[in-house]
Amino acid sequence: MRKLIETTTSEQSSTNVVHVTKKHESAVRQVQGTANYVDDLTEPQGTLYAAVGLSQVAKGTLVSVALDDVRNSEGVVDVITIDDVPGHKDIGPVFEGDPLLANKEIKFYGQPIFAVLATSVQLARKAAMKGKVEVQEATPNLTAHQAHQAKTFVRPMHRFGLNADKVKQTLASCSNAVFGSLSIGGQEHMYLEGQVSLAVPDEEDRMKIYTSSQHPSEVQKLVAEVLDVKLHRVMVDMRRMGGGFGGKETQAAQWACIAALLAQRNRRAVKLRLPRFTDMHVTGKRHPFENAFNVAFDNTGKIEAAQIDINGICGHSPDLSDAIVDRAMFHADNAYFYGCSDIVGHRLQTNMVSHTAYRGFGGPQGMIMAEAIVDKIARKLGVDPLSVRKRNLYGTSTGTTTPYGMDVGAQSNLLPEMMAKLEHDGEYWARRESINEFNRTSPVIKKGLALTPVKFGISFTAKHLNQAGALVHIYTDGSIQVNHGGTEMGQGLHTKIAQIAANEFGVGLDMIEVTSTRTDKVPNTSPTAASSGTDLNGKAVQNACQTIKTRLADCYASSLGCPDEAANVCFENGDVTLNGQSLAFSDLVQKAYFERVSLSSSGFYQTPKLQYNREKGEGRPFFYFAYGVSMSEVSIDTLTGEYCVDRVDVIHDVGNSLNPAIDIGQIEGAFIQGMGWLTTEDLKWNKDGKLISENMATYKIPAIGDTPKIFNVSLFGKENTEDSIYHSKAVGEPPFMLAISVWCAIKDAISSLSGYTCDPQLDTPATPERVLDAVLKTQLAMSATAAVGQTDTCEESE
C-alpha cells in the first residue's frame, strides 16, 4: 500500500508538533489493552446491572404489561416502565417522538417496553425475557411507498429555491433528458464498543454518568430531565469510545437515562450494556433512501435543469432526520452545476427503529444521485463518464452557485485541478483503453473503471451547534492540561488537540495532557459530529492558549523592563525569548505563579460566515468545502455477480494537514466503510418489521480480504483559504463518499456488456445478487435490441 504525503509547512513551530506525523495519543494503551472504556472502569461496590425487555411486534397499542415473573426472577432488584419516570418521558433530541420506554403505543419491532435491574448481567438479561406483553396489533408501514400512501411523515417536506416552474419548462423543451430512480440501503454502525453507560448516584439527587457518547451535554440534559433535576446536578464523563460513526450522537442517551433512573431509585451504581444482538435491534442505522431524478442536458452533456426527489426512510420518530434529509439535499449536486434545479426532500415515517446520524449525515445518499445522473447522461450520449463529469464541474465554463444559493468560489474550488491530477497520475485514459481491450476478449470477467469527485460542506447545518469551548490549565512545573468539548472515538481528535496546544506554547507533546470530556469542565458542548471536532474545539483550545500566552508574555516582558514589547515574546523549543534573552517555559510559569498571574483560561470559538434561510432554501450553510477524487478499478464475474476491487487511487484535500498519518488513516478507513455501505452491508427486515440481519453472521462488513489490492492515498496539501485551525480541513466524513467510485466502476463493468450504451439499474448495496441481476437484465436488453433492431430497448428495460 503506497501512501503519498504532500503537505505544506507554513505556521509550523520549530518544536515540530503540527503538520507532522504523530502517533495517536492512546495508541500504546490500546495495543496493550490498558486504554479504559466504560466497561473497563472499576465498578463501585454494589454495582447492579440492567437489561431491557423488547416488543415483539412492529406496531400496535399496549393492552397489558405483566411483569410479575420478571420481578420474581432470580437476582432481580427492580423493574421499571414508563410510568416510573419522575420527569420527562420523551427524550427526543430535537423534536418529540422518542419515549424512554414504550408509552401506550408500540412503534417498532424491538422497542424497549420495560427495564429490569439485577445482581448480574446474565440474571438481568434472563429476567428481561420473562415479561408478558399483550399488544393490539396494527399493520405497520415498512416501505417508502407505504409511507407516501399513508402520508406519514416525521417532519414536513422541504424544498430548495423557487425554480420548480422553470425546471418543468426546461424539461419540457429540452433536446435531451434522462430520468431514473435509485434505492439506497442503510448501514449498521457496527462500532467495536456497543452502547454502554454507568450511572453512579452521588449525594442527594446528584448523578455521575460514564457513557460511550458523542454528545455528553445532551446526555446530561436528558438525564436531568428524566430524573426531574437541574442540569448542574448531573455530571457526564466521556474519556473515549470504541467507535461511534454517528450512532452515539443521540442514541447513547436512552441507555444513560435508564441506568440513571434505576440508580436514582435504588441508590446503587447501575451499568447498562447492550449485547450486540439487542444493540442492532434497538438503535438506528444510516437512513435508507428512495430517490428519483429527471434531468435535462444539451448535446455535449452539460446539465441544464434537474428535478430531484429525495425520500429519507426515517423510522418511527424525527430523531435527526430533518437535518439528515437536508444534508442529502445539500449534496444532491455533489460537484456539478445543475443550471436551474428543483430539489425536494421528504422525511418518511415507518414502523422501524428511528434511523440516525451516520458518517456523512445524509450527504452520501444525496451525492450518489449526482453520480447516477452523470452516468446516465454519459451512456445516453455514448461518451466516457469522466468527460461528462469534467464538463459539469462548478466553475469549468459553468456557474458557481449551488441549488441553495451558496457560491462555491473559483479560488477555493480545488476539484478541476485535483481531477486533472488524478486523471494524469492514475493514467485514466491508458487504463480505459486497456480495460476496453480486456473486455473485448474476456467472455466472463469484465472490468470497470470510474473516477468520481467529492465536494462536502463542513459545518453543522443547525447554526447554533457551530460553537465550542475549552479549558486550559498550566501547572507550576510547566505541564499543561487541556479539556475541550469534543469526544474521542478513535479518530485522533485528542491527538490533534494536544498538537495544537503544544504548538501554541512551543513545548513538546509530552507536556500536554488532554483529559476526559466532562460536562463540569466545559459546558453546553455540541456533539462531535459533522466533521467539526478539530475545527471547532481546536480553535477553542487555541483561543484559551493565546489568552494565557498573552499573560505570560506580559509577565516576561515586564520582568525584562520592556513591558511595551510583550507582543514580540516568542514561545518555541521549550523556551520563551525576547530581545536575545531566553528563559525556560517552566521557569516562566514559576515566575508567573509568584507574580500572581492566572495560569488557567477558558476558550471559545464560533464558526463565522454562516447564514441559511430555511424557508427560502438558500444561504451559506457551510464554512467551506472539503474535496476529494478517487479512481477505482474493479473486476466482475458475469456468471456469479461476484466482484473484487483491484485498485484504488485517491487524492484528498485536508488543507494544511495537522497530522498526515492520522488523516491518511481516516481516509483509508472512511473509504473502506463507504465501500461496505455500497457493496456488502445489506440491512434486511422481514414482513413483520423485524430486523433479520441482526448479527455478524447475517450482516457483512468489509473484511481485510475486501481491501483493494492496490490502494494509493495522497493528500493534496493546499492550505484552506478560510481561517480554520492552522488552515487545515476536516477529514472525518468527506472521504467516506470517495467509495462511490467503486459503485460507478461496478456499473461501468456491467455497462461494457452493452458496448457502454446501457446504464444498468444497480441499487445499493450492490451485492453479488444485485450485480448478477443487473448483468442478466443488460444481456437481455441487448438481445432484445439485436432482435428488433431498436436503439432504445436498453433504456426501456430499466
Image: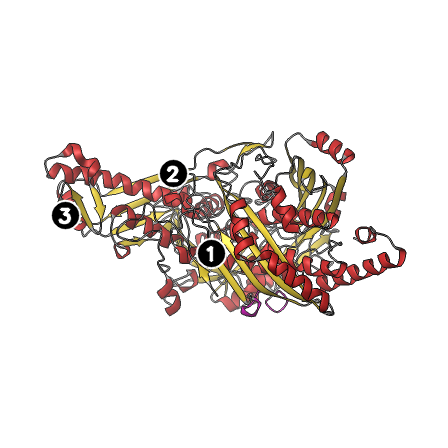
Q: Nearer the viewer, mark 1 or mark 2?
A: 1
> Which residue is the site of mark 2?
605
| 699 in magenta | yes
For the residue marked with disc 2, what is the amino acid? Tyr
| 705 in magenta | yes
Given residues 630 and 478, the one toward you in this image is 630
Residue 462: x, y in percent?
51, 38
Whichever of callouts 3 and 2 sits on the residue coming sooner in the sequence is: 3
Magenta segment, which residues?
Answer: 696-706
CB within 8 Å, label 3 to label 1 = no
The answer to whether residue 541 of the structure is visible from this angle is yes
**Callout 3: helix, strand or loop?**
strand
Q: Is residue 226 above or below residue 429?
A: above
> Which residue is the site of mark 1?
714
CB within 8 Å, label 3 to label 2 = no
Measure the alpha-carbon separation of dots 1 and 2.
30 Å
Q: Nearer the viewer, mark 3 or mark 2?
A: 3
Residue 735: x, y in percent?
52, 53
How many residues crowd mark 3 within 10 Å: few (<14), some (14–19), many (20+)? some
The answer to whether residue 678 of the structure is visible from this angle is no
Given residues 754 and 138, the one toward you in this image is 754
Given residues 335 and 267, the one toward you in this image is 335
Left or right of 574 in this view: 113:
right
Measure the alpha-carbon separation of dots 3 and 2.
31 Å
Left or right of 791 in this view: 436:
left
For the residue marked with disc 3, what is the amino acid? Leu
Left or right of 651 in this view: 479:
left
> Which residue is the site of mark 3?
583
How many residues crowd mark 1 within 10 Å: few (<14), some (14–19), many (20+)? many
